[in-house]
Image: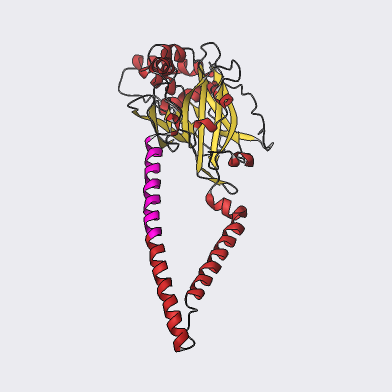
Amino acid sequence: MGDVTLGLPGSWAADNQEASDHYTTKVGGLPDWPFPRSSLAPELLQCNTCRNTVCLIAQVYAPITTATVKIEERVIYIFGCTDLHCGSWRAIRVQKPDKVEEINSGDSERSQSTISDTSTSVSKWWDDLHSFEPESEESGEKDGMDMQDLARALSEAATLASGSGKGKTKKKAKRKTEISAQPHQLADPPLPHNLREPLRHWVLPCFYLYYQEDRFNNKLAPVVPVPGDDDDINQEETWEKENYEYDKALHADRTYLKFKKKIDGCPKQCLRYSFGGKPLLATGVVSESRSCNLCGESRHYEMQLMPPLVYFLLEGATGVQRELLDNWNWMTLMVYTCSKSCFQKSDQEITNRNGWTVVEETIIAQFE
């Protein structure tokens, strides 16, 4: 906590709608949901203000490990309104509790019961199989006949089970191939060509991010002029210029100067991540983040989008995309999430979610 990680631009996607997975951190494109999109409430993908469709700005794979929480399957999606005059944002946290936590929280009793029942059944079957002991020659002959019948029946059952097992294996393998070939974001019925084209205008250019520690976190040392062998006149002019810049900086917004210095230290940073850390403010005025709507705990800072993100998006934008990006005049978008990373347990029971939960978080924007 407190350490800052930067998200820097990597390679461009071959297609703005290129399919990936929820472990991918990227800017633009389509969201890669870890579950079918049809199981997501449609209003989550609409603007809270104008009810227009929102587009993905960034998808960030963000596992967390603290003293009380450990969640490896966790993704933050940041959306923006496509209305040129609206300018509102949404942040959605999607996560799945670890299997270890599920076992320790109550499933262990069911698991132990299942294991116990299975062990008892196997033991009973094994004892019954070896309980055939001839009492006499006559009974032995009879029991021998029974053992032959039993052996024949077991052989036939094994053959049948083997054939059935192979069929199931092939069926499962085929099903797995179909799922991997059709990502969740494309699971919905494909739109006709004449309907897909307008949709593509609202999909931002897509490029991937890679992480790097903020090596420029320390304050940059001020540049101090060193007297050389120049004559006194040139030296005096140099010192006067430095004094003028210093006096000018005293009247500037110190918060913005610090913000700009951090960007100048790494001009390509599109994302700053620091779970529970402190945001890099662009202005001194910050609206308070409301507490979590589910558990009532405070929300804390987790990440923020930086101005270079818009610059790189403009490089690949065309038409309506460029018009939309030109209207984004924010300096930074800061995402605040629940400090406990809570969720509704009822979400885990939703069909096709496979235990994944969805929670909306808060975005605070700062402008010029």
Q: Position of residue 330 (x, y in %)?
A: 51, 18
Q: Is residue 93 above or below residue 313?
A: below
Residue at 57% x, 64% y is 117
Q: Residue furthest left?
A: 229
Q: Which residues are magenta?
A: 160-181
Magenta region, main secondary structure: helix
Residue at image position (53%, 28%) is 280
- The image shows residue 239 at horizontal and vertical percentages of 41, 18
| In the rendered image, the vertical position of residue 112 relative to residue 249, given as above or below | below
| Residue positioned most to the right | 296
Q: Give percent across and percent down for residue 357.
A: 57, 38
Query: Is residue 176 rendered magenta in the image?
Result: yes
Evaluate whether residue 223 shows in this view. no
Q: Position of residue 131 (x, y in %)?
A: 50, 79
Residue 290 within the segment the image draws in magenta: no
Q: Quadrant of the N terminus?
A: top right
Q: Residue at x 49, y 38 (%)?
A: 62
* Number of residue marks: 0
Q: As rendered, which of 157 and 40 lies closer to the eye?
A: 157
Quarter of the rendering containing residue 300: top right
Residue most toward the bottom?
136
- In the rendered image of this protein, does residue 85 appear above or below residue 348? above
